[in-house]
Amino acid sequence: MSEKTPKVPLISEDVDVTSTVPRGLRISAALAWRFLVVAAALYVIVEIIGYLSVVVIPVAIAMLLAALLAPAVRRLVQVRLPRGLATAIVLIGGLGAVGGLLTFVVVQFTSGLPALQRQLNESLTQIEDWLINGPLHLRQTQIEEFINNTIGFIQENQASLTASALTTASTVGEILTGFLLTLFVLIFFLTSGEQIWTFLMRGVPAAVRARTDTAGRRGFASLVSYVRATAAVAVVDAVGIGIGLWIVGVPLVIPLSTLVFLGAFVPIVGAVVAGAVAVLVALVTNGFVTALVVLAIVVGVMQLESHVLQPLLLGRAVKLHPLAVILAITAGLVAAGIPGALLSVPLLAVLNAGIKSLVSDRDPDPAAVGVLADPPAAASPDEDAGGDAEAGGEARPDDR
């Protein structure tokens, strides 16, 4: 009998199978599973934030307001006022200013509403005349049929409209609750922000505590610069567009200017929406020519903002590319609606400054970060400026 030839394995048992996989495939697989892990972690974080949005959004807004009001509290503390009293003065003054402005806007809108309705009726009559005698040559019966269909649609969907009204009422309750929570958190951020930050840093490993502390302070410094510059830009936008509306004779100048001021806190998108509302009001009340003039005024103010104010104020303090701003606003709007659009750019500014600090600092010194200093002091992670190291509070070396 002939002996059988033993089978020779294609791959030796002593050879590592991994080494036979092409290097490009191994690198791609390693990157792929790491990407999946990071994506899963981010998804879980976003889901948790969405689930706790009733708490997260008020805290985030309180942080923005703390960045805006902390410099005023600091100045009052420097004149030897107790921090609690300084916080109370700033908060009462801020709430009084906002409340007075809103009251004035409501009064102006109420007093100008009859004239607006009269002008709106005249505009509707002109539109109807244009539809009948203009190039479309619609018949009166067609217009009346359209109006009747619209009324019938509203009557048929009355139940859903009522449900929407009830949902709006519950939303008002949520807004009121969020306002109270924001105010409560803001008080503690202004009175004891430094102690809160120091307490959080105790949970960071000692080997990276100084680096993390510095990155956090630089992130808050970037937020202070962002809010301060955005407020200045918002004032210029509101005043410029308001003067233009007053010159051309558009009604409701103060309410529209206030809308422009509030919209400017949502970069690019907010200003465009507020300007579009002003143009629409001008079109309805004063006609097509006035609307074109208002559009030119809005575009001119937006050009002044984008080419002069933002590079001068925001560019030196918060270095964000316009494309990054647009993508951040879009992502925030998709993920969390209007609050997401409002908070996305400040969050991006904080992350930008914090990550740069983590990457570039070799020997970080938290005490050298001027959180409430002028914007150039916080403009670059590589350039520290002396000042109070505070995150909504006063620097106290003994608190470290």
Image (spheres, rainbow, N blue to C red):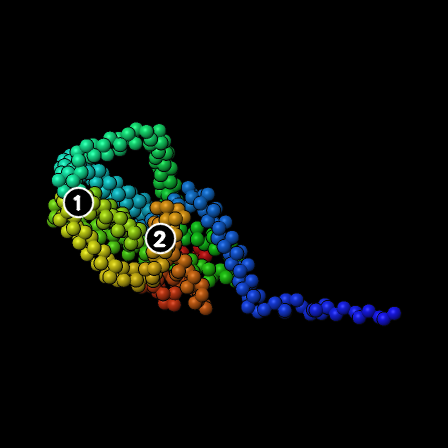
Left or right: 264, with 370 as reference point: left
**CA neighbours of label 2 inside 10 A, class few (<14), some (14 to 19), many (20+):** many
Quarter occupied by the C terminus: bottom left
Q: Looking at the image, which is closer to me, 8 or 176?
A: 8
Dot 1: element: helix
Quarter occupied by the N terminus: bottom right
Disc number placed over residue 142 in the picture, else none: none
Point out the tag, 1 or 2, that comes first from the N-terminus: 1
Q: Residue furthest right?
A: 1
Disc number placed over residue 283 in the picture, else none: 1
Q: Looking at the image, which is closer to me, 207 or 29?
A: 29
Foreground mark, 1 or 2, reads 1
Quadrant of the rendered structure where residue 53 is?
A: top left
What amino acid type should be assigned to the residue bearing mark 2? Ile
Q: Residue furthest front?
A: 1
The correct choice, above or below, for 264 with respect to 96 in the image is below
Disc number placed over residue 329 in the picture, else none: 2
- Where residue 116 appears, as percent x and y from the top left, is 16, 38
For residue 18, say whether it is visible.
Answer: yes
Q: Residue at x 37, y 49 (%)?
A: 333
Q: Looking at the image, which is closer to me, 233 or 137?
A: 137
Left or right: 186, with 143 as reference point: right
- Where residue 136 appears, as percent x and y from the top left, is 17, 42
Q: Looking at the image, which is closer to me, 19 or 207?
A: 19
